[in-house]
Each structure stands twice: as structure tokens, then as C-alpha cells.
Image (spheres, rainbow, N blue to C red):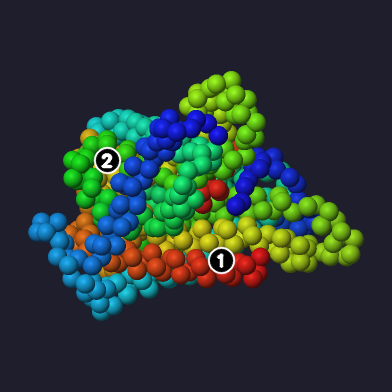
Amino acid sequence: MVRVRRFARGASGRSGPRWVSGLALVGVVLGALVMLVPFAWMLATSLKPGQALLALPPQLIPQEPTLEPYRRVVSAFPMVRVFGNSLLVAVATTAGQLVLASMSGYAFARFRFPGRDVLFAVYLATLMVPFAVTITPLFIIVRQLDWIDSYWGLVVPPMFSAFGTFLMRQFFQSVPRELEEAATLDGASALGTFVRVILPISGPAFATLGVFAFMASWNAFLWPLLVVRDRDFMTLPLALATLQGLYPGQTEWNLVMAGTVISVVPMIVVFLFAQRWVIEGVTTSGLKG
Amino acid sequence: MYERGARRWLTLALFLGPSLIGLALFLVGPIVASLALAFTSWDLLTPPRWVGARNFVRLADDPEFWTALRHTLQFLAGYLPLVMTTGLLVAVALNGRIVGRAFFRAVYFLPVVASWVAVALVWKWLLNPAFGLVNFLLAQVGVAGPAWLFDPTWAMFSVVLTSVWKDTGFVMVVLLAGLQGIPREYYEASAIDGAGPAQQLRFVTVPLLMPALFFALSISLINSFQVFDQVYVMTGGGPAGATTVLVERIVRQAFSFSRMGYAAAMSWVLFVLIFVVTIAFSRAQKRFA
């Protein structure tokens, strides 16, 4: 498994002759422009009045910037509620995953019971199965539970991820047993030891899984697409896709880009403040956004 | 460790129970059910009918399925080499000493944290044939840009480009982690032996980077078999069915045409494909890395 130790600072590599590093710098700057211009274009479009969209040459800096698209996207679509939905669903999914994954991960790391290794192998095996395999029965189950167009349908199924259990088990196995043995000798129960001894030192593992789960939930599209029709229960990605198709053939791109900015900015903020955990989560899971 | 007898089982049930029940209901259960479903015909309205292997026989004769498979492989053939190349170039450049290294790493990673829906929408607008920034910039250098997503010959390439843009940062961080694990002494020693930058890349960096390269490649491979969000948002499988892919077909069969059994059968074909390729891949890894 590939682990990222230190993203921002990192160990240094070699430096070749001067012309090589000069060329590399030029390439890196050009590439960075390619990375940034789409974000600038998104922001610029979200600040343009409707007629400026069709202006030629296209304005990368809006000539008459306006917040009108934001005002209109909020009135044309229940965007405030949608934003709240995304937040609620992501927080609830993340909290659920942290509790479930840490407790089950701890059980696999520290308890001995018959069939443990087989059971853990089953957990791992589910990681290999593409989501497309489960969507049909999962949809039927969620429909039977009457969870279509509800927060339950959005939150509960994604809470159960074998990846979280796997990550937490790895972490707990790296914790020296002596820590818990001391507490057990003092008569603490397993739950007491878990809460008082293990949880306080599990910050890094929780941060990695937490940030990862939050990001995955915030950005999820396929599952919300299947279980939500009602706008009042849509999350941001689903709302954006719906907004785009609202008037087929004449997408109001300034509105759509305003919505996109609203959905992307929180993730960028999370990334800037929790860079290390974001990288760690994405690289260990191999799941991308 | 911990209590004996009945108490012990209770504690275990407390730790593992919730995760186990959820996993059974929302993951393992649906996987098993999906396999059973693949041998039935079910439109959700009338009870499912056992049809044996008929779904699979029909799949083999379904030109739509073969087209979707071909498109998925086309996506893969374009996306994988491109994203690995850009990711490797950026990682090597940003591993050396370079001004603003932390800043550039963050910039390249930015698209990874944005949702696929947001990225797909931004690129759909960037690639707008008449008013998009891309064709405007191409026109500046005297190139008449194609209609991109509206042109069957360019649509899949547009999706590939967008995906490469989004995932370069992912490959970069995985490879950076690998690069940071290569001891500096190897470069110093090879420099003393007279190796230039190109030879160091060939004889030091690439061989020692193999595990990270394989990891990034296999994750990208598994994910690109399941390409969905960007296709659904950018083209919806069009124009004229030029970008239909496997997961998109599965979702349509199940949720637009209510052919649950047929969709399940298709999802198992996808699973087997991914499984076989992954196994072949880990064999190859044992040999080369």
C-alpha cells in the first residue's frame, strides 16, 4: 500500500543541470495554468449577466460582474435547502462511518473469535465488487424500506463501507497492546478501554477516514441519482445535473456555474485546511472524489 | 483479551454487530441478490421470473452491449496512458527542488477534490463549440476547433481529456509518495558513475517507482472500467450513442427500461472483466515490480 508521508514539504529529489530544471519549471507553470483556467472560467461565468455568455471574444474576466446568477439560481431552484441537504448527508454519513468503522475495526484487530479471518476476508472481498453490481438490489431494498426521497436512503447505505473497517483495523493493529492491557488490569471493560484509551490516540486515523468519507459523500452522484427525485432531497451534484437539463438546449450557464461554485468552494476549503488527510485518504483508498 | 463467557460475546456483538448487520443488508445481501437477479427477468411490476442463462445469451447478441464495451475500452485506451504520463511528468517535476513546490502540488490536486458533476459541467461549458473558451483559444492559433461533445468522432476524446485533467493530481500524489521513498544516495551514486538525468530516470527512478506506478495504474484501470458520472453529465451517452459505456448502460437498463435482471447480468459481466484484468495485473506486477 502506498502511503503519503508528507505532502506539502516532502523529501527532496535530485536536481539536474540548470536547463533541465528551467524547462521543468516552464512545464509546471503551463500545466498549472491548464489546471487553474477551468476554475477561473467557472468563477467568471458565474459572475456574468446572461447576454455576456455569448460575447465574443469570451471574457475570462467579466466586464460587468454581477451576483445576479447567484440570486437567480437560489430562486429558480431550492439551492439553500440543497446545500443544507449536502451538508447534513455528508456529516451524518461521515459520523456513521466513523462509529461503525472504528468499532468493527477494533473488533477485528483485538478480539479473537471463531471465523474472524473468514469474516474479514468477506469484508475485503466486498471492496472488489463494482458499485454497479449492487445498485439494482440495493435500490429495491431502499424502496421496500420506503426510503426513496428521504435522508435515510441517502445516508444509511453509504455508511457501511468495508474500506473504513479495513483502515481502522490497520491503525489499531499498529497500537501497542500494552496500552490497553494496563487499563484492563485496572478492571476497565472493553468499551471503557476503547473509549478512554484508544479513541484519544486515534485522531490521525479518524481524520483520514473522516475527511475521505465527507468528500465522497459530498461529491457522490450515482447513488443520489437513483434514490432521489424530489428536489427537496437533492444533494448538490444531483441538483447541478438537474439544473443543467432544466431547459434542454438552452442551459443557462451562468446559473449552472454559480451552482457549481457553491458546490466546489466548500471542498476546496476542506482541502486547504486538511490537505494532509485528504491526500492520505485518497491515496490509501484509491477512490477518487 | 477482555472478558470471558457470555459477557465477552455481548461485547463483541456490541462492537461488530451494527457493522455486520448493515454490511449484510446493504452490501453482501445485494451482491448475492444481484447474482440471483441476473438469472431472472424482472420489470419491478410483475414478480421476477427465472429465465436461466437467457440474459447472458441475449447480452452476447446485443449490439448495444458490445458497443458500450467497445466505448469503455476506447475510453480506457485513451485515458490510461495519458493520465499516467501527465501524472508521472508532474510528479517527477514536483519532486525536485522547484520554486513554489507546495503551491503547485496543491494546484494540480485541486480537480481531484471537486465533484465529478462540477468538473463535467465546467468542461462541457469550456468545450462549447461556439462560446467556449477552448475553441476560442484554438482559433487564436488558427485552428478551427471541432464540435467536441456534439461530434460523435470527438465526444469520447473530450470525455477522456476531461478525465485526464481531473485525475492527473491523483496519479501525481501516488507517484510522489513513491518517489519520496527512493533514497537520495542512489542518485548520488549514479551521478558519480556518470549517469545523466535521462539515465537516472531510466535506471533509478522508474525501476524503484514500479510499485507506485502499478498501484496508480491498477486503481485507474479499475475506476475507468466503471466510468459513469462524466459520461452521464457531459454526453448522456450521445451524440448518437457515440459514448455509451457499460455502467451507463446498466443504469439505463435498470432504471429507464426497468430490466432489472438484464442490468444485473450486465453488471456481473463487468465484474468478471474487472476481476480478470486485476488478477492478470497483479501477476504482471509480481514479475516486473
Residue A161, position in %: x, y? 41, 45
Q: Are marks 2 and 1 in contact (CB under 8 Å)?
A: no
Res B48 → quadrant: bottom left
Residue A107: mark in rendering: none
- Which residue appears farthest toward the left when viewing the image? B46
Task: Locate the N terminus of chain B and report the quarter of the image it occupies.
Answer: top right
Pointer 2 residue:
A153
In this rendering, would B49 be left or right of B90? left
Task: Locate the C terminus of chain B and report the quarter of the image it occupies.
Answer: bottom right
Total numbered labels: 2
Q: Secondary structure at mark 2?
A: helix
Kind of residue sitting beneath label 2 = Gly
Q: CA distance from mark 2 to mark 1?
A: 36 Å
Res A51 → quadrant: top left
Chain ID, mark 1: B
Pointer 1 residue:
B282
Residue plotted at (59% across, 70% down): B284
Q: Is residue A86 visible?
A: no
Kind of residue sitting beneath label 1 = Ser
Res B42 → quadrant: bottom left
